[in-house]
Image (cartoon, rainbow, N blue to C red):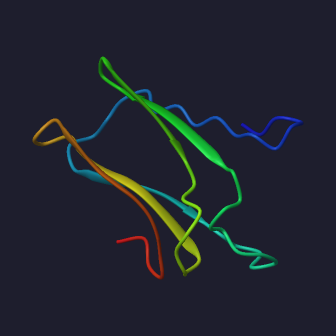
Amino acid sequence: MSNRNGSETIKVVRWIKGKYHLAVHNYSGDSYIAGCCAKIKFIYGQQKWQFQCPDVGTGKWWSVSVIDTNLNEVDIINKIIDQPW
């Protein structure tokens, strides 16, 4: 769901076993993603995280985290990279 201020909300109702890569792609390429001030908030189970896009890095992807529902683990990446994983 997209809001007027440019924010989007994605809700996962049921997690299927596997790995989820949480990443943001700079699709337009009009400017650099590093330093864009974008923020991500996410909740998995009882854990809550909030990230701001890093100020440094090159690439068109902001790789935020990997959620492994098999192990019930969240690995934090939070880097600007060329590929999301």
Residue name at image x 48 percent, y 82 percent = 82
Residue name at image x 16 percent, y 35 percent = 72
In the rendered structure, the answer to whether residue 28 lies left or right of residue 34 reads right
The picture places residue 44, in percent across and down from the top left corner, at 34, 29
Task: Determine whether 46 is above or below 51 in the image.
Answer: above
Q: Residue furthest right?
A: 4
The picture places residue 76, in percent across and down from the top left corner, at 31, 50
In the rendered structure, the answer to whether residue 72 lies left or right of residue 62 reads left
In the picture, which quadrant includes the N terminus?
Answer: top right
The quarter holding residue 40 reads top right
Residue name at image x 32 percent, y 35 percent = 15
Residue name at image x 59 percent, y 62 percent = 55
The quarter holding residue 71 reads top left
Q: Residue furthest left?
A: 71
Task: Determine whether 12 is above or below 19 in the image.
Answer: above
4 or 75: which is nearer to us? 75
Task: Determine whether 36 is above or below 5 in the image.
Answer: below
5 or 32: which is nearer to us? 32
The picture places residue 20, in percent across and down from the top left corner, at 33, 52
The picture places residue 41, in percent across and down from the top left corner, at 53, 34
